[in-house]
Image (tube, coloured by chain):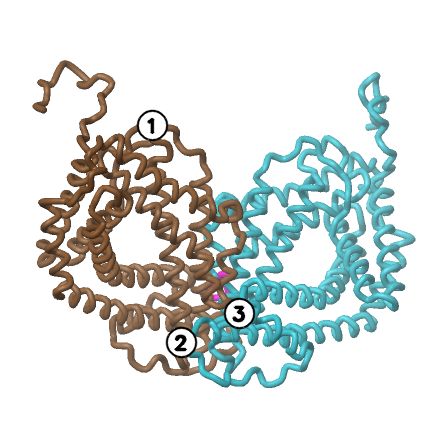
Chain colours: A brown, B cyan
Amino acid sequence: VPPAPAAPAPAPAQAPAPAYGSAGEALTGYLQEQATAFLRGLSLRGESETGADVLLRGSARRIAGVLHTYAPLTDPAWAEPLRSELGWLSTTLGREPQYVGRLARLREALRRLSASGVVEPVLATAPAGAPAGPPEQPPATAPSSGNGGPLALGAARAAALLERQLTLARTRAHSAALQAMGSSRFHGLADSLAVLASEVPLTAAAAGPATAVLPPLAKQTYQRLADAAGALPLHRAAHPYNAEAVQASLGAELTADLQDAPWHQVRVLLRLSRYAAEVPGAGAPGVPGAPDDLRYAEAATLLQRHREAAECAAAVAAAARTPRIAPATAYALGVLHADQRHEVEAARFAFSRLWQQPAPPVPAQGARGE
Amino acid sequence: VPPAPAAPAPAPAQAPAPAYGSAGEALTGYLQEQATAFLRGLSLRGESETGADVLLRGSARRIAGVLHTYAPLTDPAWAEPLRSELGWLSTTLGREPQYVGRLARLREALRRLSASGVVEPVLATAPAGAPAGPPEQPPATAPSSGNGGPLALGAARAAALLERQLTLARTRAHSAALQAMGSSRFHGLADSLAVLASEVPLTAAAAGPATAVLPPLAKQTYQRLADAAGALPLHRAAHPYNAEAVQASLGAELTADLQDAPWHQVRVLLRLSRYAAEVPGAGAPGVPGAPDDLRYAEAATLLQRHREAAECAAAVAAAARTPRIAPATAYALGVLHADQRHEVEAARFAFSRLWQQPAPPVPAQGARGE
């Protein structure tokens, strides 16, 4: 359909619904766009690994997510193995940035917790990225009654220990990612995406109009999100300083995992919902429960912070199990662990307040995040 | 100038003002009541030390506080040494219950933090009140990678360490209190209070009517409270999870002290204000700034919680400086320290919310707390 000559004013008056075509066309268009982004990321990798990986992971996650939500529209024999490979790739590529983020978050937390500024100069001279050698020598002077000196020294040593461990983990993740990118498994995946860019194997259900076929499928995803978020202890979390997330600090690690898992699950469903809404025609007005992007983007940020803090707390607990660390180091790690569990609690608080606000009446479709 | 005969006016019509008499009479009545309570506490001591000490400390604090607020009404050569001795006594008697409360609070916090319940059974077998012997043996098995086991063991050992240290401190405080009660210094104080029960040396200013003389003096105390509370960082504290109180966790102890001191000062001024308002005639209607007792009682509870958490955090930091503790113990102490600093923050949050509510219009005089 050739575009009509731009008439006088706010062109299509009350905006007639955009022509999305069939569900298959809308989905194919979106998948091809993402596959193109993936291939562009691949070609960019020589210049900027970090920037390219953001593209690669973002498009891999979007393709996998959308194939999941709109599963009835594509051939499962093609879609399911592809989703599985995309999951493998985004996990593999995601590890290094996770360690980078974790170290930055913990460094910042230690800086904040050491208001006296004792940590900074010591950290500056710590051998960043040095191989993980002997864990730690006992302190030259035994901790004794004083005004915080030995404990502040512990903060510096905890920082150095985390720096070593997370830098080592990062280096390993980097090697693993490089190895994965050179593997025949990766080349097989890249080939699949190159093919996808030209042809998506659709089912008969994809022949219906996009605005009739996509919204009910998207709605199922939104509903799963609404159900999962509704099952969270939002009422308790919305009460500040409830100390729930910290309960797990000294319990078995299982406690934290059990407590955090439903929140992580909501984070994943939120992402699925946002990707589902990105397909043209899916977020057509009048679909109840469709995500309002601004609110969803903020919720996603909060649950991302929740996850990072939870993982940082786990990393600190792991560091505390390093043999032969000094008591002052262990003490600082304990403070840091509790601090990160409080960050978990703070993220839950903010999410609960946001989520319990009444939803805006009309769903909007807009900016793409993450 | 003799007051003009009250014209037609609203004066006695709207419920005749209670006859408080002169300021000196009102103050003397209150002081005698408190001195009697003190002497009753003294005679009760044979039966119930704890109950008696609550009476002794309560009346000692009230007499000292009221002598401070209404200082212009009594002979300073008599009042000032008496206040000083009362301060010595309430401090001396207050130490033991403080250690008891501190241990209870830390025990409860460790229980809460060890959601797995690992602490409880070990604590039950810990030799409560045993002398502080060798601080701790190294753990039979070095902390190694596992699922929280060694760290949970650390919680149990931290509990046992705190139990030992605080029980020892309690025992010492108990002995010091007993010694103080048998001293000639104490007998001198008891004699002063017995004399006070029959005669308070007043100044000329005390001859005026209670409702004219007392309110302006009380108001000065309320004003000091209002100024000190107004200078607190209430705006920041009212924002949950601001992490300010935890900043001090790994800094020099001075940081915590500097940060906490203004809050402790408000706690003391709040108590002074409540005692000042207890004197009959002091809280006469129409005195702006007179404390509304319910709100003040709640504020006092919150600032008491603030102080207890701050002192618990300091006790935990002190325990962490015990030589040769195991890293797992130190880790648990670090978690506990941060937890208590978060309790400090939570108390500030609640106080800020309470204090920033608009004050009720008419001051009430009522229940006596603390």
Q: CA distance from mark 2 to mark 3?
A: 26 Å
The residue to which callout 1 is attached is: A286
User: Residue A344 is drawn in which quadrant?
Assistant: bottom left
Name the residue that disc number 2 marks. B145
Q: Does residue B173 appear in the picture of this structure?
A: yes
Residue A18 magenta: no
Q: Which residue position holds label 3?
A: B317
Label 2 crowd (10 A; few <14 / some 14-19 / many >=20): some
Residue at 59% across, 55% down = B306
Chain of the residue under label 3: B
Label 1 and label 3: CA atoms lie apart by: 59 Å
- What's the residue at 52%, 57% (across, down)? B342
In what element is the residue under mark 3? Answer: helix
Residues in magenta?
B249-256
Q: Is residue B102 left or right of residue A326?
A: right
Judge by depth and name the residue closer to the eye, A80 or A205: A205
Chain letter for mark 2, please: B
Classify residue B62 as left or right of residue B44.
Answer: left
Q: Is residue B118 left or right of residue A88?
A: right
Amino acid bearing label 2: Ser
